[in-house]
Amino acid sequence: MQWKARLIGGCAALCLSAACGDDDDAASRDGGAQSTGERDGGRRPPIVVTPRQAVAGACTVQLIAGADHFNDCTGFDQLEACARRQCELENCIDQCTQYMTCLYESETPCDPSCPAEGGCSSCMATMAQCVFGGTCSQTFACVERVEGGRCDELRACCGEQQGQLNDQCLLVAEAAASAQGEEGCAQFLQALPSLADAAVCPD
């Protein structure tokens, strides 16, 4: 399933290998994110992502949200501030100078042609776990949140899982809720029973 491959395989556990732009599909999704789109009958400008926001997790959000939602994302200033307070952002900034320089010189948000050097890549993987595993995941949104909806149902189901799957499931649930919303949560709920050792949640 495409969702399972993208979140569990590609970005996943959650972005344990999260160098922004390592995903082969990132270039096409990034192109969609940068292009001007339609909303409410008007034109919307392309999203702006600073290099610091990229290191803080905005590019991980891009991988999850895809072109359909990324240009609607808001709150990356708050994400950066939260990552600075809670996730040792400055430590990653020190390790990502080449990556940030490449992004600064590019006109493309989260440019997939900008490689994250080794220490930067591993640091951003840890950053992704911190952001989506804590309150920083609530600082940004690419879709409207729905109380008592499928994402809340997914969180409850993830809470029924055991061991490492519990942690990974909750990370994916928060990522889905913030970046893709009800549609993404519903798809992952459908895929969850097919994962090894996953508990079956009641309908």
Image (cartoon, helix red, strand yellow):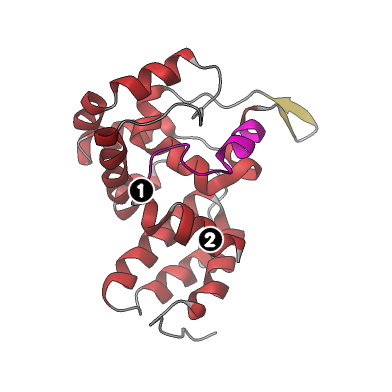
Q: Where residue 47 appears, x then y in whole percent? A: 57, 27
96 magenta-colored: no
Q: Where residue 33 appears, x then y in whole percent? A: 62, 33
* SS under mark 1: loop
Q: Is residue 121 left or right of residue 70?
A: left
Q: CA distance from mark 1 to mark 2?
A: 14 Å
Q: Residue at x 39, y 67 (%)?
A: 169
Q: Is residue 70 left or right of residue 199?
A: right
Q: Residue at x 57, y 39 (%)?
A: 70
Q: Earlier in the sequence, mark 1 or mark 2?
A: 2
- In the depicted structure, whether residue 2 falls above or below residue 22: below
- In the depicted structure, whether residue 167 falls above or below residue 43: below
Give the residue furthest to the top: 105
Q: Amino acid at mark 2?
A: Ala
Residue placed most toward the observer, 11 or 160: 11
Residue receiving disc 2: 5
Q: Residues within 10 Å of mark 2 (few under 14, many from 20)?
A: few
Q: Quadrant of the C terminus?
A: bottom right
* SS under mark 2: helix
Q: Amino acid at mark 1?
A: Ser
Residue placed most toward the observer, 187 or 30: 30
Q: Point out which mark residue 17 bears.
A: 1
Q: Where residue 111 appears, x then y in whole percent? A: 51, 27
Marks 1 and 2 in Cβ contact (< 8 Å) = no
Residue placed most toward the observer, 73 or 115: 115
Magenta residues, start to end: 17-33
Residue placed most toward the observer, 185 or 124: 124
Q: Where residue 138 appears, x then y in whole percent? A: 39, 47
The reply to whether residue 182 is in sight is yes
Q: Quadrant of the N terminus?
A: bottom right
Q: Residue at x 43, y 22 (%)?
A: 50
The reply to whether residue 71 is in sight is no
